[in-house]
Image (tube, rainbow, N blue to C red):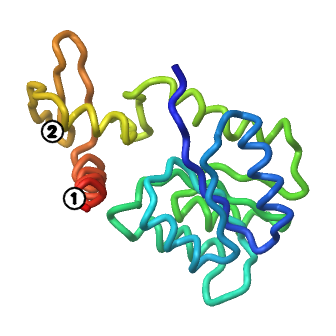
Amino acid sequence: MQKKLKALVVDDSITIRKIIKANLNKLGVNEVFEAANAEEGFKIAKTTFLDVAFIDYNMPGSMNGLDLAHKIRADQKISSLRLIAVSAEFDEKLVEQFKEAGVKEFIEKPFDLAKFNIAIKPLLEDKESDSTISESGGTKLTKDTLERLFATQPQITVDGNYIVFMFGNEKITMDIETFVAKSFYFLDITSE
């Protein structure tokens, strides 16, 4: 059973936002938030439990997409948000700067829909399971995983930098830092 993905599209072009949103909708992603600038995008990222954000590089305002990526990575509550950079002007230097900001995926404008689908496919596969392995070797936290962790009483152990949850025969391992950051975010949501 596929879980619901929540995506954010940050681009000053309403046309690009609508194209990305339409493609995400075709792939089954129905909760897509839009922002016309980086400042608005950051506010949405801070207040919404998102799985991915598509960030345009060149936008008006005090922040461009690279600045937004750095600001997201610096915020403990949302630092693990998956970011996909979008631009018509990628060069080696810009790609390297985005990589330094923790962005690993890039989509060039104008869109090649096949490349777009390839970039989003891992996210769709991740959501088919509550506990998927992240780059750090731990579990990628989803809202469903957190709800499950807080709704049950698993056996919990710590192994180095990882926390291990045992649910009978099922084992979920995740990076402690990520778990703590996401847990506080989750608790903020449920306490309202």
> Given the current orientation, which residue lies at the most extreme bottom position?
62
Q: Secondary structure at mark 2?
A: loop
Residue 136 percent across, percent down from the top left: 38, 41
Q: Nearer the viewer, residue 162 or 28?
A: 28
Q: How many numbered circles are shown?
A: 2
x, y (%) of residue 9? 67, 60
Q: Residue at x 47, y 67 (%)?
A: 72
* Quarter of the image where one finds residue 29: top right
What residue is pinned by disc 1? 191
**Which residue is drawn at the image coordinates 84% and 36% (left, top)?**
114
Kind of residue sitting beneath label 2:
Gly
> In the drawing, does residue 45 fall left or right of residue 90?
left
The answer for how far apart the CA atoms under marks 1 and 2 are is: 30 Å
Q: Position of residue 164 (x, y in %)?
A: 18, 30
Q: Nearer the viewer, mark 1 or mark 2?
A: 1
Amino acid type at image mark 1: Ser
Which quadrant would the C terminus be assigned to in this image?
A: bottom left
Mark 2 = which residue?
Answer: 160
